[in-house]
Image: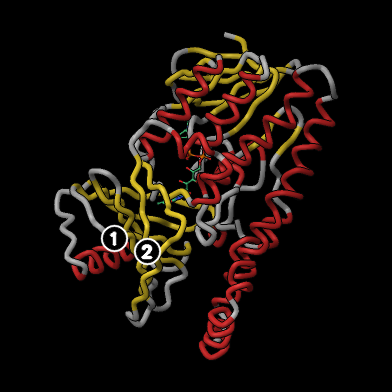
């Protein structure tokens, strides 16, 4: 089997890149071992992301609108934010299904299979999969945070650049979206209501609490909120949260390949918008690749364009987020003063939101 572009991973980044490249007229093969599945995720998409990708807002698929969010501080002080622009919470099975369907409709071939090896020879990529091999001129790696091919193409993420996550899909509904910060945890707990279940989870920096400890903290909190999780499906996953130096040295492309979405490290639990960043990087890669595939530019130029686009459009978002995270580690009195300043100057708060989105 031969394609112009092979995309490994059919999450939001891979599926969107597949859709855009197929629309540009290329033969695109997307391979995902699970296709539409309930990928561990809150599934929350902000209004800003929905404005950028209005097809998500308008999609005739099930999603849940949330209009208020309760924040709980480490010392259990509570504040409820009424959102003038609601957040949409998607089940990931539904969202992935929607994105994959769009890729298919645009002409991409979508295969359910696991890629087990990637090699290059004679200017072509050879992808080994459970049921045979396939060849492609160009390779897009969109295999998520656990991207098994990362070490072959770029520096593996360091433990300090990763977050551990654990959570439950709890049947039933909850009227509230809730985010709880815990003393000493570089992370947080979330409860995101969906149509027929609640996605509850916790994230914490690797090297901090173990996965078992994170799970215990989450369970204690769920108990305290009166949420019954006995028998609920448990999940755990990892999430890149790169430091400023790691972001500067990030390798996201090379001769004949590009990495997008979580696989590239384009996610940050602090700014939250992993799904939107996955879509953005999928589009960036497709926009940069299309001229090469249409014989309008060289492979080298297309590759460099992707690198420059990442540095211009995505890097500043991550750098600002990384700076904000540093701010949160300042001593309490300084942090509180910054908090008061932000409270007194809404324009400054809005600016902070804007530069990290
Ligand atoms: C617990 C948790 C909560 C989150 N909550 C939110 C949230 O509320 N809002 C938000 O915006 N973001 C959230 N995120 C981040 C968001 O889930 C990711 O940023 C987003 O899914 C990235 O999309 P992607 O396409 O890059 O990768 P993924 O969605 O991870 O997709 C990667 C795909 O690659 C496939 N794959 C991997 N290896 C292979 C292989 N060898 N062969 C074939 N297929 C393969 C997988 O099956 C998978 O479908 C959360 C993340 C976690 C872990």
- Residue at the extreme bottom of the image, as rendered: 333
Label 1 CB sits under 8 Å from any ligand 1 atom: no
| Above or below for 255 versus 238 | above
Disc 2 crowd, CA 10 A, few/some/many (<14, 14-19, 20+): some
Mark 2 lies on a secondary structure that is strand
Q: Which of the two residues, 229 or 194, is positioned nearer the viewer here?
A: 194
The residue under the point 22% across, 50% down is 170
Q: Residue 335 sits in which quadrant?
A: bottom right
Quadrant of the rendered structure where residue 203 is? bottom left
In the picture, the disc for residue 176 is 1
For the point 60% across and 29% down, the residue is 17
Query: Which residue is at the front of the view, 208 or 239?
Result: 239
Along the line of sight, which residue is nearer the eye, 58 or 197?
A: 58
Residue 234: x %, y % from top left? 26, 49
Rate crowding at label 1 as few (under 14), some (14 to 19) or many (20 or more) other CA atoms within 10 Å: some
Query: Which residue bears the numbered disc 2?
Result: 69
Q: Position of residue 34 (x, y in %)?
A: 39, 28
Residue 152 place in picture, x, y as percent = 63, 37
Q: Quadrant of the C terminus?
A: bottom right
> In the image, what residue occupies the spot 64% across and 35% down?
283
Instruction: Evaluate if marks 2 and 1 touch, with contact meaning CB atoms under 8 Å apart.
Output: yes
Q: Is residue 287 left or right of residue 37?
A: right
Disc with the residue nearer the chain's start (2 vs 1): 2
Kindly state the secondary structure of the residue where label 1 is placed. loop
Compute the Cα span from label 2 to label 1: 7 Å
């Amino acid at each position: 089997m031969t394609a112009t572009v092979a995309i490994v991973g059919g999450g939001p980044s891979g599926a969107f890149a597949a859709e855009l490249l197929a629309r540009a007229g290329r033969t695109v093969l997307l391979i995902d071992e699970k296709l539409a599945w309930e990928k561990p995720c809150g599934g929350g998409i902000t209004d800003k992301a929905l404005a950028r990708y209005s097809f998500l807002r308008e999609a005739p698929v099930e999603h849940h609108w949330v209009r208020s969010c309760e924040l709980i501080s480490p010392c259990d002080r509570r504040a409820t934010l009424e959102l003038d622009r609601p957040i949409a919470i998607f089940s990931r099975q539904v969202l992935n299904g929607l994105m994959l369907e769009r890729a298919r409709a645009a002409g991409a071939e979508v295969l359910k299979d696991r890629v087990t090896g990637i090699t290059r020879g004679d200017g072509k990529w050879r992808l080994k999969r459970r049921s045979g091999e396939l060849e492609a001129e160009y390779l897009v790696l969109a295999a998520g945070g656990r991207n098994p091919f990362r070490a072959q193409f770029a520096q593996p993420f360091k433990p300090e650049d990763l977050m551990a996550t654990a959570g439950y899909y709890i049947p039933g509904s909850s009227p509230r979206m809730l985010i709880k910060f815990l003393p000493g945890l570089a992370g947080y707990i979330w409860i995101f209501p969906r149509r027929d279940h609640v996605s509850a989870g916790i994230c914490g920096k690797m090297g901090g609490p173990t996965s078992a400890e994170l799970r215990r903290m989450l369970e204690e909190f769920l108990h305290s909120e009166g949420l019954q999780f006995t028998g609920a499906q448990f999940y755990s996953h990892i999430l890149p949260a790169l430091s400023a130096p790691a972001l500067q040295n990030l390798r996201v492309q090379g001769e004949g390949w590009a990495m997008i979405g979580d696989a590239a490290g384009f996610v940050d639990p602090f700014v939250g918008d992993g799904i939107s960043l996955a879509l953005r990087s999928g589009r960036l890669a497709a926009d940069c690749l299309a001229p090469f595939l249409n014989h309008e530019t060289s492979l080298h130029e297309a590759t460099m364009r992707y690198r420059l686009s990442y540095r211009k459009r995505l890097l500043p978002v991550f750098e600002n987020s990384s700076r904000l995270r540093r701010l949160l580690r300042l001593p309490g009195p300084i942090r509180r003063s910054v908090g008061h300043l932000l409270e007194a100057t809404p324009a400054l708060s809005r600016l902070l939101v804007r530069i990290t989105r």
